[in-house]
Image (cartoon, helix red, strand yellow):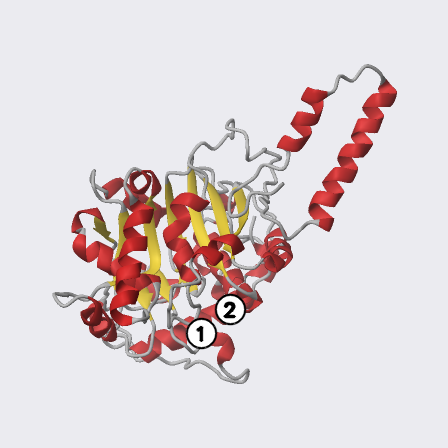
Amino acid sequence: MFSYCFEQNKNSQFIHIFNDYQVNNKILFSSLIIIMLITWSIFYVIIPNNTSTTTNNNNGIDPFKTNNSLERKIHIVILFDGDRGLQYLNSLLKSIFYYQNGRFRCDSKACCLSKFCDRFMKDCQTVMNNVSTTYTTVFHFLITTISLNSQLLNLMNTFKLRNMEYHFYSCGNRLADIWWIQSRHPSGAKPFLKLMITEILPSTINKVIVLDIDILLNTDIIELWNHFDYFNETQSIGIGLEQNPYFQEVMTRLESNWKGYGYNNGVLLLHLSKLRSTNWNHLWLSITRRAIEHQGYLITGEQDILNLILFRFQYILYEIPCEWNIQLSEGSDVQRCPVSWLTYAELKKRNYTTIVKQPKLIHINHLTKPDDIIANYTPTEYIDQSDVILKQWELYDKFVSVYRQYTQLNESCFQ
């Protein structure tokens, strides 16, 4: 019997077998072993589409036990909706791993394409000897269709990493609960699963980073996780400013007293234990129903609802610095968060008139994604950086270029 959209420890089945039966001789013991192997095969091969939890850990540590040598864990939740997002997820993961301490194989010439090794030239061996020793990265994938399990499993199995775990949650039954939400978001009501994380994930998980799939990191994600340390007693949701002026028009239709830019849901810090201590599910559901009754539909889906909540209950809001969600949607105003995006070599030159903030996370929430662009499209090599601050189209070109570099980087370049 499977519990949908809820993490389940498969190994617990075998513990019950040993509790129920006494092994009195070698023959019986051998028989039990055979039964266990058959059961294991059926579980993974014949029934791969049910809710599952899969873990990759090359140190042989059982993720369901508490005696992990690395007690500090950061939890990252990603909504995975369709095989079209597989390559974007691949590049997102590579960008996360690239900036984590000691993950990148800078000692391998095959990994040094596109200047990936530039930032490690002086201390590559030192970096290689300190492989993410401070924390374990735990991924939680919310899967909208159970048939996607095998594709995602194949992708994650290509990464042979230490201090990394991943878990799958098949959430088809949760989607059945929100079918009534009329959303004009390209993904429909599926992103509302983000608001249900308090129920989907085990109650032992207290804090999570939630990321959209069309994102690249430009620094170590532990820096984002550390923002939880700045939450006060009432703050439970961390989020960055919306950078597209159109969203203000969206929100004034739902809230007559609306003021401000609003916030973008592509990157979230959720303090789950605080949210669980409130009537969170009732809150977002009731506000969603009222918004649907008022307008008939939602334009940006769950982002509309979360903004209504944060507008009315501002004491739960923690504003993430804008460079943690540089948005590249059509019409985005770069002046809301002016940044450059310089390579390691460019930053070392420091011969620019101004050095402004570097983007820490770039979110290509544009309807036209890199893989939608014709294959022979070449991003602009020369970008006018006389004043360093990049225009929207320059940031978009830069994203396409970096994204394609990650697609060419083999998974074996990470450890």
Could you tell me if residue 138 is visible in this image?
Answer: yes
Could you tell me if residue 122 is visible in this image?
Answer: no
Q: Residue furthest front?
A: 293
Residue assigned mark 2: 405
> Percent x, y for residue 153?
62, 53
Displayed quadrant of residue 369: bottom left
> Percent x, y for residue 181?
38, 64
Residue at 38 percent across and 59 percent down: it is: 218
Residue at 76 percent across and 33 percent down: it is: 36
Residue at 30 percent across and 43 percent down: it is: 275
Query: Which quadrant holds the N terminus?
Result: top right
Q: Residue furthest top?
A: 24
Looking at the picture, does residue 399 appear above or below residue 136? below
Kindly check if marks 2 and 1 are in contact, taking CB atoms under 8 A apart as contact: no
Q: What's the residue type where badge 1 is placed?
A: Val
> Percent x, y for residue 165?
53, 43
Answer left or right for 333 relative to 116: left
Residue assigned mark 1: 400
Secondary element at image label 2: helix
Looking at the picture, does residue 311 appear above or below residue 71? below
